[in-house]
Image (cartoon, rainbow, N blue to C red):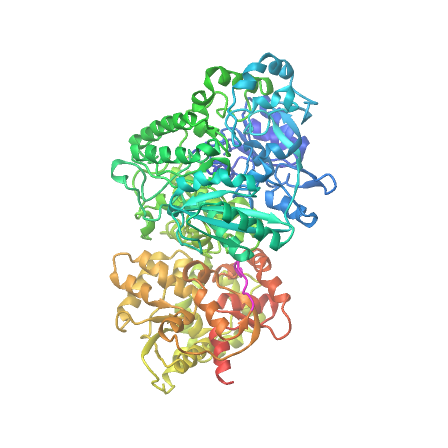
Amino acid sequence: MPATDLTRALAQALHGDVESDATARALTTMDASNYRRVPHAVVAPRDTADVAEALRICREHATPVVPRGGGTSIAGQATGTGVVLDFTRHMRRILDLDPASRTAVVQPGVVLDDLRAAAAPYGLTFGPDPSTHSRCTLGGMIGNNSCGAHSVAWGTTADNLRSLRVVRYGGGETLHLGRGLPDAPPGLHAFAADHLALLRTGFPELPRRISGYALDALLPEHGPDPALCGSEGTLAVVTEATVRLVATPGARALAVLGYADEAAAAEAAPGLLPYGPLTVEGMAADLVREPAGLPRGGAWLFVETGGDTPAEAHAHAARILRAADALDSTVVTEPGAMRTLWRIREDAAGTATRMPDGGGTSRGSGAGRGGEAWPGWEDCAVPPARLGPYLRDFRALLAAHGLRGTPYGHFGDGCIHVRIDFDLLTDDGIARFRRFSEDQADLVVAHGGSLSGEHGDGQARAELLPRMYGDEMVGLFTRFKDLWDPDGGLNPGILARPARLDENLRFAVLPRRPVDVAFGYPHDGGDFSAAVRRCVGVAKCRTQTAGPDVMCPSFRATGEEAHSTRGRARLLHEMLAGEVITDGWRSTEVRDALDLCLSCKGCRTDCPVGVDMATYKAEFLHHHYKGRPRPAAHYAMGGLPRWLRLAAPFAGLLNALARVRPLAALARRLGGIDPHRTLPVLARRTFRSWVRTRRAPGAGPDVVLWPDTFTDHLSPEVGRAAVRVLEAAGRTPVLPRRGVCCGLTYVSTGRLDAARAVMRRTLDRLDHAPGTPVVVLEPSCAATLRMDLPELLPDDPRAARLAASVRTLAQYLEEYAPDWTPPRLDRRIAGQTHCHQHAVLGDAAERRLREKAGLTGELSGGCCGLAGNFGFEKGHWDVSVACAEDQLLPSVRATEPGTELLADGFSCRTQLDQLAGRRARHLAEVLAEGLDG
């Protein structure tokens, strides 16, 4: 988009970033709601002066401004048509942290978990903790008055706010806001004095009233307070906040209480509050995909307790158990088990978006498609004593409208989250969405509740505020907005003079017919648009902290939204929409964002809704380069199986030539390989040739051992070791005929026509009996056979049969040789769990096998950063190294002498060799060595 007068003026005046290109605009069209608005530009200010100058210039150009934090708002308030202020790039500093006064001074872009980590050494934390704590910002929390699971103990963000520094639309001086209103817009004191009676009587008393403006905070008996918290960016822009910190318990325990149903759990929740719990969270069985150690019941309360010692926290939880009239219960104190249970709750905003059966009961009548469920009525709140009856009425209302939803949330505060299978793609479905919304608002008000109990009204509910407050109070909201923002430039259409709840829906711009694609997308009805719609924007992929998950290594390396799973999904959404990104599959914006996707498949498992960016990338590259030349790496590394077969007879000569620097540099340049990379050494004798000349002992039943390209030509020692292990377990490994290949390298470079041809040839050449297990030693090849093969050949039943027969070595031994005892090795290990293993295959069998062999320690999560062809491609070196430095390399450097390095993936072993100078081995090699005693 050509620079406008506005963007030129902003770029000349500001020190921060000013972007109006298609990528920047596409990345900010949506938050985590059902809404979409296209901004004119995105500004990332560096400091308060930048904010004030941006607001001045935008007022001069009559352009609205939307302050944005992590973009996880679910009611549409973080979308806008003018200038979006992105505070996550530069204004993310903790300016002061004072343990004595238990306060911190933060900029609006500070991520909540960063503040909590800074406060933790002093035994302090910030009390409000929404489930998006790893990526939401303090500015966004202030805008929405966020709460989280611990609000029964520590209150809402407003309860933990000391003071603010803000700038109004038009710029000017910074206002300091706190108790007593030291600074205030002209007329604010008179406004409060003129309406004392209504301010005292017009607001329901309940712990989670977030809807509308909190005008009762202006009352003299309350301080007064400026009522800015929860104003959703419509009054002023926060540039600095002083927040209260609270003491964290020395130890915690989790009482998990099982009840017959959610209504029974809801009715029990208020009775637990007098015992002083830290949380009283509730969820029903229809949200839980796997029991995960939950006690018996159809619904559960998660009641966290604290104490100075573990014994005190446990005793506190035991008192909760005795007081609760539950069907079944347990107390969990082990940190890992507690994290597992809390993850079920924290991922609920995503998992509830896809119903487990893949479709709603009323899909035939237009409600819900493919099991999709959406926000819009995510967080209503009622008095806790009314929660049980309210839930029964709410379920009845859903049924009356032919809809389904899965309630869960903050039962102790009477606040319920739910995603509902609205059909937001058709006119009839949108009309039903409106009718339900109106009836739901009336139901909440009938129970004395608030339309929003946590995330704000945004566009989703602000239109219905008169049903809760009446016209007179809503008129005061408008006057209050005008006192702060007389030009109406801050987040228009939100709270005051709101847009209609069925306008600006983000699905309206998507194609109405399925897009012609190569993959089958079986979980999305074969519809690529539905696959892209999976991303609801909760942004778990934007987490910067390393952990056992893989997603999203490129975002952790660059910190840029375009390199997150969410960012790429947004760009694909806009590509399908054709408004911001106008050249479809030929889009350079999408291509550039996907270029740094490692195809690690981590999002397939770690994303709560199973966004599968590796597949989307392969699909995009397939269309993007159709009928035109590709990058050299696509030919060199995409066709690796073919080149290695041709090179095998000349391996010794080629290895010698590769040691000649000019020739190696030429080979790298011609192959599109990064100059930092060392070319892999070719095996002088392939795995297949070793098997052909070896007399097999015929120890037992046959098992097909897959000769993947990497094992056959680059690491045959892994195949030889696997043969020895299988024979020791009483099995006879046999290899399929020559010419079989999983097609991995063709898939990862988007050469999907070639991939399907290779896969069909493979299926034609397989001659083992159906149902015979196939052991695949390379995790990426196993994942391709398990996942990509049936999704690229959905109409070939042989593909599904082969996919179902694939096993890793550990999976095979556990399933088919359960009585075999591995050699006892008794040594420490470190290394890497392959990202494809984590995402597609799982590593539980490997963990159990290592334990039996006495291999102790943990392998790194994340991604090694080489990721097949990715780390070899020219231009990817820096990101590849950064990914390795995220977890793998630090863990290896910290190992003690004698630690065994394990990595079943050829990429992981190569990365360790080239970056750390350390040799890692496949688990098969270590076990085979142990067979020698």
Out of 720 and 831, give the one closest to the viewer: 831
Query: What secondary structure prevails in the magenta region?
Result: loop
In the image, farthest residue toward the front = 322
Horizontal relation, residue 587 to residue 19: left or right? left
Residue 545 in view, yes or no: no
Q: Residue at x 50, y 85 (%)?
A: 932
Q: Please tell me whether residue 672 is drawn above or below residue 527 in the rendered image.
A: below
Is residue 825 a member of the stretch shown in magenta? no
Out of 80 and 595, give the one closest to the viewer: 80
Where's residue 18, x and y in %? 59, 35
Q: Please tell me whether residue 489 is drawn above or below residue 722 in the rendered image.
A: above
Out of 488 and 432, give the one closest to the viewer: 432
Residue 840, picture quadrant: bottom left
Where's residue 420, x and y in %? 37, 38
Q: What are the residue bounds of the magenta stretch?
A: 857-865
Is residue 864 a member of the stretch shown in magenta? yes
Q: Residue at x 39, y 65 (%)?
A: 782
Residue 275 in view, yes or no: yes
Q: Please tell me whether residue 321 is drawn above or below residue 730 in the rendered image.
A: above
Where's residue 54, x and y in %? 62, 29
Where's residue 912, x and y in %? 57, 67
Q: How many marks?
A: 0
In the image, farthest residue toward the top = 194
